[in-house]
Amino acid sequence: MINAFHSGLKLLNCSWLYLTELPSFFYLCHMNLLSVENLSKSFSDKILFKEISFGIEKGEKVAMIAKNGSGKSTLMKILAGKEIADSGIVTLRRDMKVAYLDQDPFFDESKTVIETLFHSELPVLKLIREYETFLERDLEHHSPQTQKDLERSMVAMDDAHAWDYESRVKQIMSRLNVHHLEQEIKSLSGGQRKRVALARVLIDEPDLLMLDEPTNHLDVDMIEWLENYLSRQNISLLLVTHDRYFLDNICDNIIELDNGKLYHYKGNYSYFLEKKTEREYNESREVDKARNIMRTELEWIRRMPKARGTKSKARVDAFEGLKERATYKKTDEKLHLDVKMTRIGGKVLEMKKVHKSFGEQKILHGFDYTFKTGERIGIVGKNGSGKSTFLNMLTGKESHDSGKINVGDTIVFGYYSQGGMQLKDDKRVLEVVKEIADHVPLNDKTKIPASAFLTLFQFPPEMQHTFVSKLSGGEKRRLYLLTVLMKNPNFLILDEPTNDLDLITLNILEDFLAGFGGCLLVVSHDRYFMNKLVDHLFIFEGDGVVKDFNGNYIEWRALKEEEDKEESRIKNQESRKKTEEHKSSKAEKKKLSFKDKFEFEQLEKEIELLEKEKTTLSEWLNSGNGTHEELLQWSNRYQEVSSLVDEKSLRWMVLSELQ
């Protein structure tokens, strides 16, 4: 379990020590894979955390929670050996393998995807890397030499019993949509890079897995697969995430980094919220109690004669500690969203017979919809299905091929895009906001200066003169959100707004959006966020098909699961029917006619050709090559060929027995 250590050790200026290198009195933490003792880190005059201690045992899945800028990512980097602490000790059990997913993964830009994925020195991974390389070359060139290389590699895989491992690797790559293995890293998009980085740490099979915002850039299907994968696997996990369903379904231990201190909670996210409220209430009572006692002690200090005895000195020393507790002031964590919304007229936005394609890929095919005031729509679909393109068309950032998009005269878009605002690192926070407006109108019809508005958004005066380059990823996203809202929009478009935002900001944003009177259009992989805010969904199914579902994400997912079960039931029913037909045909005792003999001979040839085609299709699908359309076409043909093989094989068996 997560535990704190109270051994009172002298602090050491180091970040990493192996357990066997420590003195014998450290035996008490021998069960921990990871132990942290009195760790401190600060930047300039800002203390991120001070003398924090905790440990992670084998099999534990721990979530770390803190507001943006508190030092979550810095702490993760220290634990992974990427940064150095000011003081304290981080110990890892010897020969333990750690894998770390950075929020912004770093790669060798000159390497290919396959070289990046299989960077480990494990012999089995070297064999798989070699096999995947030869397989991809053989599919492209079909030369005698590549065929020989592939055969040699397959023999080596057999000898090492590596096929089960390779199958698991294929599953990870397939579910995270990692293909085109010879592609160079430098040509990948941000989302592709994150998925490659995630695949790499999962393939490594570490003893301890540290993930910093792993769900960013993943679609919902990928997130649910990753959720199931991490829940089933017997791995130890330290996780930073804003996804509350993901957090609740995987972790049952939470550590909270708050004002430089660490708090431990043995339970899920709901339990954490309850106990955090209880802790803060008790802390405020302790502060009030200390203040009352301090008034009495302060009078005694003022009356006390200058000559002090031993008891007097002890009382004075105790007074200093009491003073520190009584003057403790908790930083206000609440983000205040009270921006004014521009008045919205009768006409909002109308789309008539809208078409959009990129080459062979259809995004919209004759899409019709009329938006109404106060609508709250969520958009779901696989990555690459055209969700962001759809939003860009609404706001005029992208043109449509045909049809009409009519925007009402009073509509003011507030577009929070996935790519974010291109903030200049050499600008100060206050300068970024003042470039938009010096004063911001609020709902109560008053105006406040840009500096005061920044303060409401958790950017206190001392932070407003900080350069953008010094902000954390979450702080930059919060600043971007501020610039969107201060334009007083009445049609909010949010493309993955939850990425990198802390849970405190998310809760306040949700409360603000729940009371927002304009139109709301949300693309998000955060299921909790979607369920709380949207009334119906646009389902991007691919090939230009967009369905309107009247309900939230959970309701749609439940319906989809029922449809999948029904489809599976029908397939099983058909399979049983074929088996019964086969048994029935077996019972018929008759000699083969000339026509039957001819059919029997033809079936043998047809089955052989179909089996070859099935093998080829399987290799193509597993290779990861091919466009989305090609993969879909191969998959459909594979199912068709499999059905034909089953059907013809049953008929062949019937004729074979009669013969």
Image (cartoon, grey):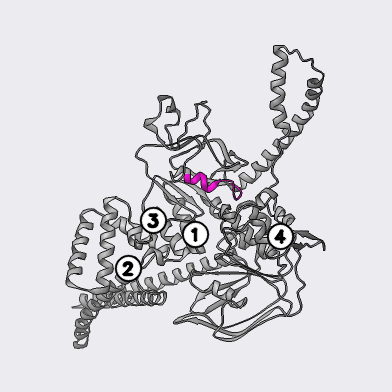
Secondary structure beneath dot 4 equals helix
Q: Which residue is mark 3?
A: 200
Disc 1 crowd, CA 10 A, few/some/many (<14, 14-19, 20+): some
Residue 559, by quadrant, is bottom right
Q: Is residue 316 left or right of residue 217?
A: right
Q: Which residue is mark 2?
A: 623
Sequence-wise, which precedes: disc 1 or disc 2? Answer: 1
Q: Residue at x 50, y 51 (%)?
A: 212
Question: What's the CA distance linking mark 2 and mark 3?
Answer: 17 Å
Q: Residue at x 59, y 87 (%)?
A: 403
Q: Secondary structure at mark 3?
A: helix
Cα separation between marks 4 and 3: 38 Å
Mark-to-mark CA distance, 4 and 2 = 47 Å
Q: Which residue has dot 1 on it?
A: 224
Within the image, what quadrant is residue 579 found in? bottom left
Distance of label 1 from label 2 (alpha carbons): 24 Å
User: Which label sits in the foreground, 3 or 1?
Assistant: 3
Quadrant including the C terminus: bottom left
**How many marks are shown on the rendered structure?**
4
Residue 623 colored magenta? no
Q: Pick the residue in front: 182 or 207.
A: 182
- Which label sits in the foreground, 4 or 2? 4
- For the record, the magenta segment spans 66-77
